[in-house]
Image (tube, grey):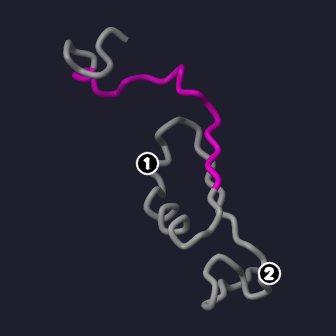
Amino acid sequence: MRKAISPESPRHDLDGNELCALTVHAHPDDEASKGAPTFAMYGETGVRTVLVCCTGGEEGDLNNPALKEPGMPFHGL
């Protein structure tokens, strides 16, 4: 059964249990485009937040070829 958040203490449910928000993403930086504002809000209210990233990003592709050009952060990759 889903429990409501206590209005007196937004870090706890109505039974006084501490809340924890977990987010799981496949790639580094995925959290930046998928829920970052929500997790920031929870963190600001004192809710424990945990981020799990399942890969190190070593196999990723750079989708914007312009970033590989001289003077850009990923030049030479």
- The N terminus: image quadrant: bottom right
| Range drawn in magenta | 50-67
Q: In this view, does 31 lie to the left or right of 74?
A: right
Where is residue 75? Give x, y as percent. Answer: 29, 13
**Helix, strand or loop for disc 1:** helix
Decide whether the magenta segment is chiefly helix, strand or loop: loop
Residue 6 appears in which quarter of the rendering? bottom right
Label 2 neighbourhood size at 10 Å, few (<14), some (14-19), many (20+)? Answer: few
Q: Earlier in the sequence, mark 2 or mark 1?
A: 2
- Residue 1, relative to residue 34: is it above or below? below
Q: Which residue is drawn at 54% across and 20% down?
A: 58
- The C terminus: image quadrant: top left
Nearer to us in this view, 31 or 18: 18
Q: Is residue 76 left or right of residue 1?
A: left
Between the C-alphas of marks 2 and 1, the distance is 30 Å
Q: Residue at x 48, y 43 (%)?
A: 30
Q: Is residue 59 left or right of residue 8?
A: left
Q: Which amino acid does label 2 sit on?
A: Met
**Helix, strand or loop for disc 2:** loop
Q: Residue at x 54, y 73 (%)?
A: 45
- The label shown at residue 1 is 2
Residue 71 appears in which quarter of the rendering? top left
Where is residue 16? Give x, y as percent. Answer: 77, 83
Q: What residue type is labelled 1?
A: Ala
Q: Which residue is drawn at 61% across and 30% down?
A: 55
- The label shown at residue 32 is 1
Label 1 neighbourhood size at 10 Å, few (<14), some (14-19), many (20+)? Answer: few
Where is residue 35? Give x, y as percent. Answer: 48, 58
- The furthest residue to the bottom: 8
